[in-house]
Amino acid sequence: MTQPLRHAAGSLLVVGLGGTEITPLERAWLKLVRPGGVILFRRNIADASQTRALLDEAASLASEHCVRCVDVEGGTVNRLRDALAPLPSAGTVGAAARRLSKPGLARNHGELIARAVKAFGFNTTLAPVVDLALPDAAEVLGSRPPGANGAEVTAYAREFLAGLAAQGVTGCGKHFPGLGGASGDTHFATAEIFRTWRQIWNEDLAPYRALHASMPMIMMNHAAYQNMPGAAPGKNRPASASLFWITAVLRRRIGYRGIILSDDLEMGGVLKFLPIDEAAIAAIRAGNDLLEICHSPELILRSYEALVAEAEHSTAFRRLLIHRALEAGRKRRRMYSKGASRALTAKQLEALRVQIARFRDRVAAGEPDAIAPRTEALAEIR
């Protein structure tokens, strides 16, 4: 039972790597853990050929039907900015679509991002952001949200997701149940949100309620929601480790059937609430299918061993972990059975750069979109 249990635990992790090539140490722990996915950042990406080689080797050491994911939202969060081209933000595209009465611009945005990530060997982009552009989170989120209310965000996300799907790329709605009311950055601390249940249900959750069947993946955030009904336990608990938000609301009330992914468990929003080994166990118990751990091999291995140890200690948790791994594996197989896309030629890559530049000029309307990362916003620079 030990080996299948270890495989199950590893398959629930989405892990980061240190550089542009896999080191001997990384190769060793990848063989041990066999993660369900790999996430790359700017530190890992030099060009399309190198990135595809890195992803191919990582996937060969991972579980079957590996998630190959990257954060390409456009605007300030775009890991391909230097290696390919700057893309306009969701906020810029959403505003242009409304200003010009052309909702298809959001679909164009999704198609261009899908083509970009496919060119580098990815099968998943962790987009769209479907948080609301509210004043509380303006400093933290910047131009990442596509609109200020549920209707605007839903209109953008519907078209964007259709653009991704048309290119065969998996999208991920984030950050459930919504960071629009967060004045703090969950990269550093557990942000407290004081919006009421009615506000969250009617506005923040509107995109998920309308589009959950079109979202292959949804990411949980690390904020805590203080004004929930008395029946909602653990108000100080991050949503990523909350049975209420994941199982009661997202799975049961909204009826979501896709993959639920935690935001990076190395972020302060969860680590200041729980040490990472306890956070990994709590996140699986709460209902996550995959856990992101994006940087430290030590924390990846600690989480992996914590899941295995808890499953060896608790029969109930062992059953849960194996069930979750089987379910997540079936979903990954359904989503990623076609394998990696074909590489583009140098001429095709250059043509894609030109198309992105033309699209960026079309939606900017003379107001340059923020494309360089802000040094104070951790999500945008790493």
Image (spheres, rainbow, N blue to C red):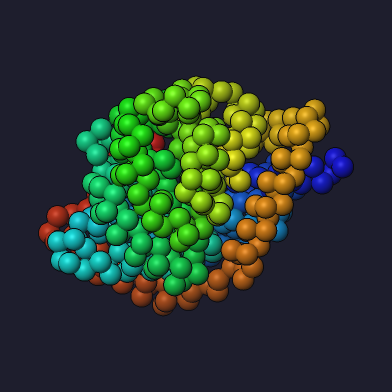
Quadrant containing the C terminus is top left
Residue extending furthest left? 366
Residue 77 in the image: state x and y as whole percent: 36, 48
Q: Residue at x 58, y 42 (%)?
A: 288
Decide which of 154, 167 is in the foreground and name it. Answer: 154
Residue 290 in the image: state x and y as whole percent: 60, 45
Decide which of 322, 169 is in the foreground and name it. Answer: 322
Q: Is residue 242 left or right of residue 226?
A: right
Residue 304 in the image: state x and y as whole percent: 70, 36
Q: Residue at x 45, y 55 (%)?
A: 212
Q: Is residue 35 left or right of residue 186?
A: right
Q: Residue at x 63, y 44 (%)?
A: 13
Q: Vertically, is 140 above or below 89? A: above
Counting every numbered tag in the picture gives 0
Q: Vertically, is 291 above or below 312? A: below
Q: Is residue 83 left or right of residue 341?
A: left
Give residue 298's quadrant in the image: top right
Quadrant containing the N terminus is top right
Residue extending furthest right? 1
Residue 348 in the image: state x and y as whole percent: 42, 76
Q: Vertically, is 166 above or below 158? A: below
Decide which of 122, 141 is in the foreground and name it. Answer: 141
